[in-house]
Amino acid sequence: MRIIGHRGCPALAPENTLAAFEAAAARLDWVELDVRRCGSGELVVFHDETLDRLTGATGRVADTSLTDLQELTIGDSDESIPTLAAVFDALPDRVAVNVELKVAGLADDLAAVVGDAGNEVLVSSFDPVALREVRETTALPLAFLFAADWAESLSVAADVDCAAVHPHYDLLSSARVDEAHDRGFEVNAWTVPDREVTRRLREYGVDGVVVDDPALAV
């Protein structure tokens, strides 16, 4: 069962920062990150639509230039908001990357960033449109993220030609994992809160768990 460091594992360092990815890469074979476009056009690694929760600044990421974003720091750390390219530059090739697209319209730029990367890449999103754009642009494997509507979500994943589904862990049972496998999907569950849930999901036969703390996998 693969262990995927959620946003680089915020238990180790501030989420979605180079420090978090480097710390996770020293412990895990997979990391997950969030991607959106900033105001000057670059792809940046940042979960929220707005800056408030993580930086104390105000405004939307999509309205803020990269220069202005990189003057901000995450929480009380010295870590800034990285570009997607900078994260791939920092990660060893052996570390696989689950790139979660927060919005549509990123496929071409995503392909330009990861095209020469040595890392295995899996592209996920809650937005089927974003996944379809990637399917039309690249041969990267896809995963559909969801937190409800199991049957409908499997149908969406099949329609988009996904290799995997990423359901919230509360949706899963042994029978549902078997169903997803029978339909040709790998199953990576998010975001697993403790060791007991990790143990239960392993018994269900999931292929991977997304965690904030690598210690949950022990």
Image (tube, rainbow, N blue to C red):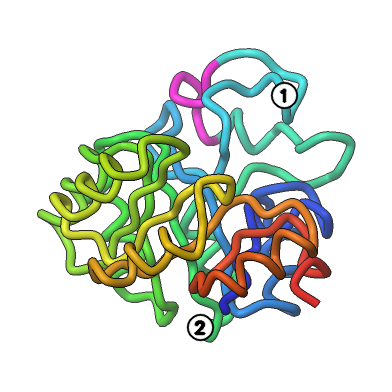
Q: Residue at x 45, y 32 (%)?
A: 38
Which of pointers 2 and 1 indicates the residue nearer the eye?
1
Q: Tell me the SS state at disc 2.
A: loop
Mark 2 → mark 1, Cα distance in angstroms: 31 Å
Q: Could you say which quadrant of the image residue 102 lies in?
A: top left
Q: Is residue 77 above or below residue 25?
A: above
Q: Is residue 125 above or below residue 176?
A: above
- Looking at the image, residue 72 sits to the left or right of residue 110; the answer is right
- Residue extent of the magenta highlight: 60-66
Mark 2, residue position: 93
* Residue extending farthest bottom: 94
Q: Residue at x 83, y 55 (%)?
A: 11
Q: Tell me the SS state at disc 1.
A: helix
Q: Which mark is residue 53?
A: 1
Q: Could you say which quadrant of the image residue 179 lies in?
A: bottom left
Q: Is residue 93 above or below residue 84?
A: below
Split into 4 quadrants, where in the image is the N terminus?
A: bottom right
Crowd class of label 1 (few under 14; some 14 to 19; many from 20; radius 10 Å)? few
